[in-house]
């Protein structure tokens, strides 16, 4: 690990170094593709769907724990975004990813609220489908991690899910959440530590058996 | 892994949480790959719906079929014709020629009644019913005439 100079830097797992374009490459859609999508170009939309579809879906599924509902929410997000991008609803040129994820998060929150109103559990549904992870030990491990994730507070969980399920960079997250990058990095690290402690505690109590 | 997938850089994650970060990366990847092969095609269909939205359901429900619209127009025309025809009917008078027995509803009032009918009617059946009631109202102008007068009118064949 390279020498670190301050706490903020130490906590930056993907802080963009000079010349590091990785954050732009994390699903960033070129302006000409967005312009073509706004005109209804099918290839442009195919690219946007390929770049973001499963990331939004994973985010929704992590929170809703229902594959069908997660897909329904994802479809609703893309229908909305298509309508707004083609019309006058999109004002944030250059920040498409943050805008898209904001729409997605709002839809997911609405779906969670609706599920609670209808007294449907969103946290206790089935574990990962066997097809998603072939290795049984790995599946058990990931299920434990999912269980721990569900016990995090809202703000911590949000950062974890945006980062690991939605594959957002911290800069994009900062735009989305309106918080400084350093704050989000610290929150991410704190959430990871909480998860680690929960996992260790679970192991001590035989959760891995 | 798609062209846009990237490996989260948990290798740059602080040492103490690296293992859990790696686990979360694998969890996220498992969730992303859990959607089936037709997932993107269904999203494209959703995009199509977003680009060309269907009419809002309640607006669509209020839209009448063309045939029904034609029927409504015909019924309205019929109702109007019934009302317009009535003032041309000779106003009954008493045998002594002392003027009308009962004041028939004025033409202006009848037009207003028809307009009110058209506003309030939702179906062809309603219009027919309302049109027949207008006829009844006009005929009902005889109501209130005393029996003796009515008797003499009947004898004359006026009624």
Image (tube, rainbow, N blue to C red):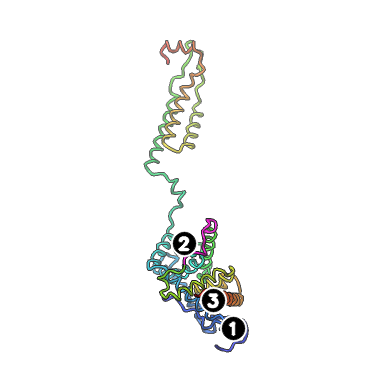
Mark number displayed over residue A69: 2
The residue furthest right is A6
> Which residue lies under the disc numbered 3?
A203
In magenta stretch: residue A122 = yes
User: Residue visible at 54% across and 68% down?
Assistant: A150
Q: Compare marks 1 and 3 and give the one earlier in the sequence.
A: 1
SS majority, magenta: loop
Secondary-structure class at tag 3: helix
Q: Nearer the viewer, mark 2 or mark 1?
A: 2
Q: Is residue B87 above or below residue A101?
A: above
Q: Position of residue A12 (x, y in %)?
A: 57, 81
Please identify the quarter of the rendering in which residue A158 is found: bottom right
C-alpha gap between disc 1 and disc 3: 28 Å
Q: Compare marks 3 and 2 and give the one earlier in the sequence.
A: 2
User: Residue visible at 51% across and 78% down?
Assistant: A23
| Quadrant (top left, top right, bottom left, bottom right) of the N terminus of chain B | bottom left
Q: Does any portion of residue A171 appear in the rendered image?
A: no
Q: Is residue A164 above or below residue A122?
A: below
């Amino acid at each position: 690990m390279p020498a670190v100079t301050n706490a903020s830097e130490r906590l930056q797992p993907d802080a963009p170094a000079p010349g590091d374009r990785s954050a732009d490459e994390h699903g960033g859609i070129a302006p000409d593709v967005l312009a073509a999508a706004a005109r209804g170009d099918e290839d442009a939309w195919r690219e946007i769907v390929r770049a973001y579809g499963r990331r939004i879906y994973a985010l929704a599924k992590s929170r809703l724990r229902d594959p069908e509902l997660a897909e329904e929410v994802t479809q609703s997000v893309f229908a909305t975004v298509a309508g707004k991008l083609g019309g006058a609803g999109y004002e944030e040129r250059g920040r498409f990813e943050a805008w898209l994820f904001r729409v997605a998060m709002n839809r997911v929150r609405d779906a969670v609220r609706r599920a609670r109103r209808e007294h449907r559990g969103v946290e206790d549904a089935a574990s990962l489908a066997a097809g998603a992870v072939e290795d049984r030990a790995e599946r058990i491990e990931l299920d434990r991690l999912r269980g721990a994730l569900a016990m995090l507070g809202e703000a911590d969980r949000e950062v974890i899910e945006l980062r690991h399920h939605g594959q957002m960079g911290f800069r994009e997250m900062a735009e989305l959440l309106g918080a400084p990058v350093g704050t989000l990095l610290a929150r991410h690290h704190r959430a990871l530590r909480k998860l680690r402690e929960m996992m260790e505690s679970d192991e001590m109590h035989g959760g891995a058996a | 892994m798609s062209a846009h997938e990237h490996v989260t850089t948990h290798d740059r994650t602080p040492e103490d949480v690296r293992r859990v970060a790696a686990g979360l990366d694998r969890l996220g990847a498992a969730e992303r790959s859990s959607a089936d092969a037709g997932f993107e095609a269904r999203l494209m269909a959703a995009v199509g719906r977003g680009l060309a939205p269907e009419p809002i359901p309640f607006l669509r429900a209020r839209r009448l079929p063309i045939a029904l619209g034609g029927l409504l127009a015909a019924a309205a025309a019929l109702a109007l014709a019934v009302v317009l025809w009535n003032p041309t009917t000779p106003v009954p008078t008493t045998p002594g020629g002392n003027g009308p027995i009962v004041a028939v509803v004025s033409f202006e009032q009848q037009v207003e009644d028809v307009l009110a009918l058209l506003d309030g009617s939702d179906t062809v059946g309603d219009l027919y019913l309302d049109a027949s009631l207008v006829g009844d109202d006009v005929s009902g102008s005889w109501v209130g005439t005393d029996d003796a007068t009515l008797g003499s009118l009947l004898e004359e064949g006026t009624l």
